[in-house]
Image (cartoon, rainbow, N blue to C red):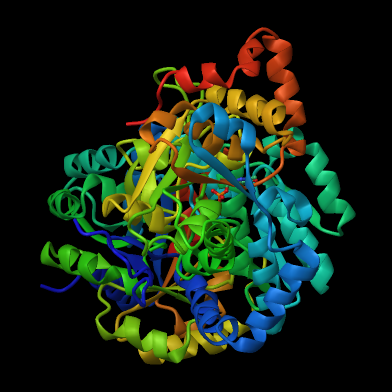
Amino acid sequence: MTPKKDTTPTDSGYYGEFGGRFVPELLMPPVLELTRAAQEIVASKEFQDEFTAILRDYVGRPSALYHCPNISRELGLEFWLKREDLNHTGAHKINNTIGQALLTKKMGKPRIIAETGAGQHGVATATAAAMLGLECVVYMGEIDVERQAHNVRRMELLGATVVPAKNGTKTLKDAVNLALKDWIANQRTTHYCIGSVIGPHPFPELVRDFQAVIGLEAKEQFAARTMGRLPDAVVACVGGGSNAMGMFHAFVPETSVRLIGVEAAGTGEPGCYHSSSLSQGTPGVFQGTLTKLLQTEQGQIEPSHSVAPGLDYPGVGPEHAWLQATGRAEYYCLKDDRALNAFFVLCRKEGIIPALESSHAVGWVLDNADRLPKGGNVIVCLSGRGDKDMGIVEEVLAKDPSAYSDIYSAKYAVKGPKEGK
Amino acid sequence: MGSLLTTRIEEAKAKGRKAVIPYLPFCHPDCERFWTEIEGMDAAGADVIEVGVPFSDPVADGPVIEEAVNECLERGACLKGILDGLAERKGKLHAAIVLMGYVNPFMQYGWEKFAADAAAAGVSGLIVPDLPYEEAGEIKALLRAQGLDLVPLVGLNTSADRLALYAEDASGFAYFVSVLGTTGARDSLPEEVFEKLTLARKAFTVPLALGFGIKTPEQAARFGDLADAVVIGSAIVSHTKAGGSAAQFLAPFLK
Ligand SMILES: Cc1ncc(COP(=O)(O)O)c(C=O)c1O
């Protein structure tokens, strides 16, 4: 199949066979209203200027493109990081929430709602809402409220109300369901700020376009440092897929650049819960879109898991499903322990504490350097910083202090077991 | 051949009352009693029976139905079980059967196979809340080919333009959602319902059913001839869960 270059979805939001708008009719009016607003408001110069100014002055963009000297030396390739962890609030999520909160304001709606798993998107939404003067409610699975108590307090400090989802698996997907229900009931005053490239059209496209700044900057910064060249590969972790789509978008037409997405394989034991919707899921309809899902043969959505709370979602953005189907992007999965290994390697080798989500992308490159051209250039999207994950890491270390004694040797990491297809 | 859904609703009208459409998710209150309740409601005179196809993420449902459906899934409820049970009872139920469920379980079963098996089991139509007009085209045609109706859902915020889209090729009946929200019994319905139901009445030639939030005959009676049928869901589910019989709950609606 020839890789597609045109990434505009159809009018009804399809990327090939994936996408669409599978929502109750009661949600169609706000979904259509949002589609128009995206075309008219977001596309306007006035909006783009304001958005760009906030990203520069408040978020701290452009984020750095950092060449990691130590890991590069050990891997025998040029290892670059796009530092989304340096953004205000510590992750790429803020790019999208600033965009959607600004849009909410321009649409004349006073209230914004969001779902969050790890809490990063919730914190980013609460931040944008406070900054732009919007009322904010964040839905969060009851289990995540407990696991991520620190982020709950941050959201509350920022003026948001956090509502625990006590239904279903009590995690992210249930928080999305609650947010959709809130949106049905309060659509006249409320915008639903979805946190990834998921959900009904126009969300996958809207969120991607707000995140596209990641890849655009990376491309420019890389060219400026290499006399106009392109990297050999760009790599990002995939939960719902927003940091990856943001990183990929500018590179999709550049067919010499490999696009590599890394999903969470969980513990990796047979039958374990994981979050590898692209690597191991099947097509189906979930939360407004036709995409690849973790589901039973009967079409019930299965619980997901990852040591990285932000990757823990049983679906994925429809544009990724399409990039995979057309062969334009490659997707692999990485186990919890390899992500943790990468976490430690980046801490010790480069002095950067990465989010466990981003550690999946870093870890895939550490473990699969021989699948990449020797001396080639690889840019990994460092989607967030790891402060939020200290509790999880400490728990893992407490269970098995010896497990990561090899962290001083990145060589070990390179020789580690291969993950993926 | 006309739609059995339309026929049953018109027969009720001829008797001078609104048609009664109870909802019960498969395997509620348990897998065996479910069929006893269905047969009971049929014998009591329910005109159409809406069988819920359990789905793990029911976005259009409120807490009562969501909880019930999750319990049903734990009991192993699946689409095949419903179709097998209905096939066994084919020709024995007077009420027309409509299945209510979300897209994904039907899709995994395979729409084409589903349409054939459902028709063979005596199902008359389908209500699929997460299948709006734009996504319904091909599926509607597949169902039609087997004589099944795809019941459109419209509501307080459906514009005249969209009512017209749905009305153009509606069959069976149209389902008017009485609240801007999810399923669940409510003490009162919004005043807007009157005005919007009038618009819907003008748009559709098929009968109109009013649903979401209804728990008493009086609530429905307020809308007079604007609604031809009422759908009762959460109120029955709560009643059966507490040990009551669905037929007994329906009695006042069937007077
Ligand atoms: C730091 C970080 N990276 C990645 C993700 C995964 O989201 P996405 O796949 O949409 O980028 C999250 C989600 O919370 C996150 O916090």
Q: Quadrant of the C terminus of chain A?
A: top left
Instruction: Using residue B170 as the reference point, say whether residue B234 is left or right of it.
Output: right
User: Farthest front residue?
Assistant: A227
The picture quadrant where one finds residue A113 is bottom right
Q: Residue at point 35% right, 35% down?
A: A280
Q: Quadrant of the N terminus of chain A?
A: bottom left
In the displayed structure, A176 sits above or below A348; it is: below
Res. A31 visible in picture? yes
Image coords of residue A240 (percent x, y):
51, 49
Image coords of residue A356 (percent x, y):
63, 34
Judging depth in this view, the residue of B42 and B130 nearest the camera is B130
Judging depth in this view, the residue of A227 and A18 nearest the camera is A227
Instruction: Using residue A122 as the reference point, say whether residue A155 is left or right of it.
Output: right
Image coords of residue B175 (percent x, y):
40, 72
Image coords of residue A239 (percent x, y):
52, 45
Q: Residue at point 25% right, 75% down?
A: B171
Judging depth in this view, the residue of A95 and A132 nearest the camera is A95
